[in-house]
Image: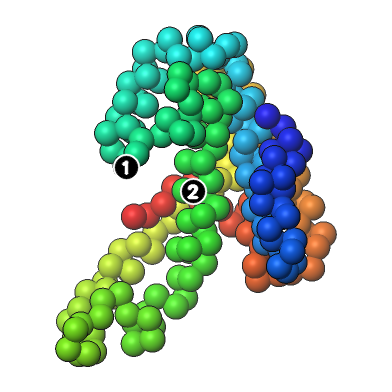
Amino acid sequence: MQAGSFCQEAIEEFGDVVDDLFETPAFANRLALMGVIRDHVSRYVALYFDSDSSLAGDEFFGQWLDRLRLCIPHGVDEIVGSPVTIEGAVKLLSTFIYLTTVEHEIVDAGVWNYQLWSDVQPSRIYTSGLRQPLDVFQRFIYANFTFQIPRTLLMNDFSSLALDQRGAAAFRAFLHDLAGLQALMDGQPAACWRIEPRNLKANINA
């Protein structure tokens, strides 16, 4: 699935709703990021599976889906399809990558500077109205320092993780696409709502 087709799909599903209410530049930003992710996953999956039946017959992929069905409430069949399809698998894999990179940057890394404002946005509210005890606040600070470690950025060459040279080329194409999107954003005025490829981490710290 190409980025353009994904964006059109999302616009058809949500565009009329958001356009009637207000401008949504952040929505377009997220679509662009997801489009690059979808392109990468689609390109990679297509290297090893040429049909829905070949994917459905893959033992290891099937075992992974079984584990997800056990761990995730309501499972993943609504996304991946039942029986599984390549299009569904691309959606599922893209969603995982998006959640651990883009969404994590939005809801976690993006608010990092405000995490110690527990008097304003406490993580726990006592029924008695008691303010956060000092020892709890101190442990929270210790935990934050523990998380202050360098993390691998998504804009890295992950070709060494590939199964073969075809997969390595797909990873390099992903990096190229991310760099291309970043170049487009570099030419735009700064915006606090924008998530850029260069800020995305390849893993989370939780």
Residue 58 position within the rendered picture, expressed as x and y whole percent measured from the top left: 42, 12
99 in relation to 88, above or below: below
Disc 1 and disc 2 in contact, CB within 8 angstroms:
no
Q: Secondary structure at mark 1?
A: loop
Quadrant housing residue 125: bottom left
167 displayed left or right of 78: right
Q: Quadrant of the C terminus?
A: bottom left
Q: Can residue 48 be seen from the camera position used here?
A: yes
- Residue 1 location in percent, x, y? 68, 29
Answer with left or right where residue 131 lies relative to residue 89: left
Q: Amino acid at mark 1?
A: Pro
Query: Which residue appears at 22% of the width and 90% of the height?
Result: 129
- Image disc number at residue 28: none
Disc 2 packing (10 Å; few <14; some 14–19; many ≥20): some
Residue at which label 2 appears? 99
What secondary structure is found at the residue carrying circle 2?
helix
Q: Earlier in the sequence, mark 1 or mark 2?
A: 1
Would you name the residue on which mark 1 appears?
73
Q: CA distance from mark 1 to mark 2?
A: 17 Å
Circle nearer the viewer, 1 or 2: 1
Residue at image position (53%, 61%) is 106
